[in-house]
Image (cartoon, rainbow, N blue to C red):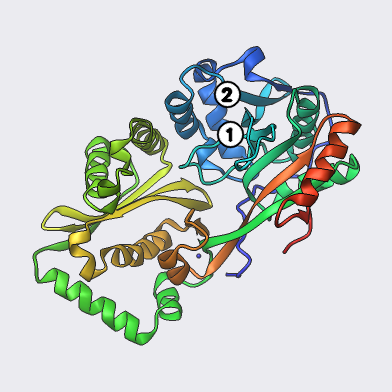
């Protein structure tokens, strides 16, 4: 798990010289139904991507589209190179921009997609961005610009985008920058806990663990395969709904689309060895559970839940401590928490940060680009792309 500027997992490969490439629009050549036939190529792309994004892998994006876009209106842009799938990004035409009636193109996401970066074959980053921006120019319609959310601000994808914007004299703006917790340290789990938690905090957690053990058998159970995945998902959904989310009506089990995406994506990830799940059990029943997507050499935290009746024992933090040890065993270099930028627990126990941003890019002809410049001046937090806040 060692710098405060968290690294992005990449597969180093020299940028390829420009060749004939095609970016296809799903409305013209594919819908999510057609993508089912390309899952093998899609899964290969995920393992060869310059930067990982589990939320755009087949086992996550397909269930998401099936749940939230049953009619197949979302355009799936496929970047093909030499007849080989080399990039993928879902794109939607939006009428409103953060509450304002401003039409634009945007990378499509739902509430449980925590990274918006496209999947791009290593070495094809510049070609991909050129093709995407060219497609956006030709298919802008009423859209005034292209907006990409939850983009990693460090790594080869952003570097390539900045290069393309500079060479094309195309304006782009970093309109929002945030940082979220990531575990990225050269220390092992024991060293990290000693560095993060004070001696009093470590003593308190041991006390809580001992008090929990007075109630019965306590054990941790982790799995990285697909065994008993349906039962595990059902237990997780029940556990999550037992607390405040269930009372507020926001638990996944109470929402058909969220429930479908959760169960189908975890099953698909497990079948591909892309899932790590961990549970804290008391007398065989879970009191805390978490799921993590595996994207070697790193990982992405997905969902956690705990039984609020046992909150005095801090089961969530006890589980996170054990998770650090599991990460050591699995030899991951880093794990992105995917937590909110102000998450009180993850920010306290994971001290490194990953910069995530929202980017708007000029598209179309001269008049449209001039209007984009006017709009971007009025957007709060506007920063020229390439400049770090």
Residue 195 relative to residue 131: left or right: left
In the rendered image, is residue 357 in sight? yes
Q: Nearer the viewer, residue 177 or 352?
A: 177
Is there CB contact under 8 Å for labels 1 and 2? yes
Estimate the x, y position of residue 105 in percent, counting from the top left: 68, 32
Estimate the x, y position of residue 138 in percent, counting from the top left: 80, 23
Residue indicated by mark 2? 74
Q: Which mark is residue 108?
A: 1
Above or below: residue 257 compared with residue 318: above
Q: Answer few, some or many: residues within 10 Å of disc 2's Cα (few below 14, many 20 plus, some between 14 and 19).
A: many
Q: Who comes first in sequence, dot 1 or dot 2?
A: 2
Q: Secondary structure at mark 2?
A: loop
In the rendered image, is residue 227 in sight? no
Estimate the x, y position of residue 387 in percent, counting from the top left: 78, 59
Residue 153 relative to residue 66: left or right: right
Figure quadrant of residue 210: bottom left
Residue found 76% across the figure and 33% down from its top: 144
Q: Nearer the viewer, residue 56 or 386?
A: 386
């Amino acid at each position: 798990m060692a710098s405060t500027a968290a690294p992005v997992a990449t597969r180093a490969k020299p940028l390829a010289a420009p060749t004939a490439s095609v970016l296809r629009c799903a409305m013209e050549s594919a819908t999510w139904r057609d993508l089912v036939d390309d899952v093998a190529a899609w899964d290969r792309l995920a393992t060869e991507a310059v930067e990982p994004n589990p939320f755009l892998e087949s086992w996550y994006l397909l269930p998401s589209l099936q749940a939230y876009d049953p009619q197949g209106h979302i355009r799936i842009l496929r970047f093909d190179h030499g007849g080989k799938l080399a990039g993928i990004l879902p794109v939607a035409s939006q009428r409103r921009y953060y509450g304002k009636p401003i039409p634009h193109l945007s990378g499509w996401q739902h509430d449980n997609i925590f990274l918006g970066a496209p999947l791009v074959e290593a070495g094809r980053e510049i070609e991909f961005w050129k093709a995407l921006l060219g497609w956006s120019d030709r298919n802008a319609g009423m859209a005034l610009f292209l907006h990409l959310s939850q983009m990693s601000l460090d790594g080869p994808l952003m570097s390539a985008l900045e290069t393309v914007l500079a060479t094309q004299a195309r304006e782009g703006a970093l309109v929002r920058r945030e940082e979220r917790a990531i575990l990225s340290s050269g220390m092992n789990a024991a060293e990290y806990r000693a560095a993060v938690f004070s001696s009093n905090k470590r003593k308190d957690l041991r006390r809580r663990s001992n008090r929990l053990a007075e109630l019965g058998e306590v054990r941790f159970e982790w799995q990285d395969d697909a065994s008993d995945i349906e039962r595990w998902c059902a237990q997780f959904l029940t556990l999550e709904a037992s607390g405040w989310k269930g009372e507020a009506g926001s638990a996944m089990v109470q929402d058909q689309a969220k429930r479908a995406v959760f169960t189908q994506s975890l099953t698909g990830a497990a079948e591909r060895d892309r899932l790590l799940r961990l549970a804290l059990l008391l007398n065989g029943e879970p009191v805390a559970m978490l799921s993590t997507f595996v994207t070697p050499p790193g990982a992405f935290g997905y969902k956690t839940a705990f039984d609020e009746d046992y909150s005095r024992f801090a089961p969530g933090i006890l589980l996170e401590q054990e998770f650090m040890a599991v990460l050591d065993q699995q030899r991951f270099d880093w794990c992105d928490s995917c937590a909110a930028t102000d998450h009180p627990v993850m920010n306290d126990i994971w001290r490194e940060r990953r910069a995530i941003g929202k980017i708007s890019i000029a598209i179309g002809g001269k008049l449209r680009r001039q209007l984009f410049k006017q709009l971007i001046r009025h957007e709060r937090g506007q920063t020229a792309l390439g400049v770090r806040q």
